[in-house]
Amino acid sequence: MPEMSVVVRWPDGREQDCYSPSLVMHDHLAEGETYTVADFERRAAHALAVASERVRATFGFACTSAAATREQIARAATAYAPDQLVEVVRMWPPMPPDERTKP
């Protein structure tokens, strides 16, 4: 299961590196895009829950690192108004080309 990292820039300019045990983050966020804090938190929480369930399906247990990342994002989001903007600075690794073309 490929792991990935998502770097976000919060409204005050602080950057945070967010871990995911799955490339599923690409299904919910896009590099270079901005989201409101509330929307980003919702999208990231959903993607990390899906990623954790993929780990559970493969290994028989949920991913505690995904849960920790979800908590770190939720904690960081409390410092900002829900309508402020978060930028997705980088997503690594990128989605493989053959995966981008699947329906």
Image (tube, rainbow, N blue to C red):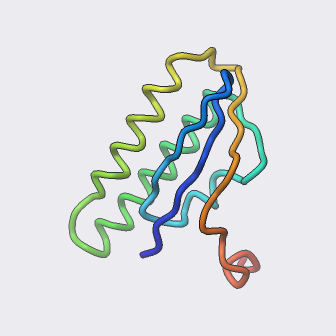
Q: Residue at x 67, y 53 (%)?
A: 90
Residue 83 versus residue 9 in the image, above or below:
above
Residue 97 versus residue 65 in the image, above or below:
below
**Quadrant that contains the C terminus:** bottom right
Q: Position of residue 82 (x, y in %)?
A: 63, 19
From the viewer's side, name the closer residue of 84 and 7: 7
In the rendered image, the residue lying farthest to the left is 60
Residue 87 versus residue 3 in the image, above or below:
above
Q: Position of residue 29 (x, y in %)?
A: 66, 51
From the viewer's side, name the closer residue of 96 and 82: 96
How many marks on residues? 0
Q: Residue at x 64, y 34 (%)?
A: 39
Q: Position of residue 65 (x, y in %)?
A: 33, 52
Q: Quadrant of residue 44?
A: top right
Q: Quadrant of residue 99?
A: bottom right
In the rendered image, the residue lying farthest to the front is 14
Q: Position of residue 86 (x, y in %)?
A: 68, 33
Does 34 sit left or right of 2 as displayed? right
Does 101 sit left or right of 82 as displayed? right
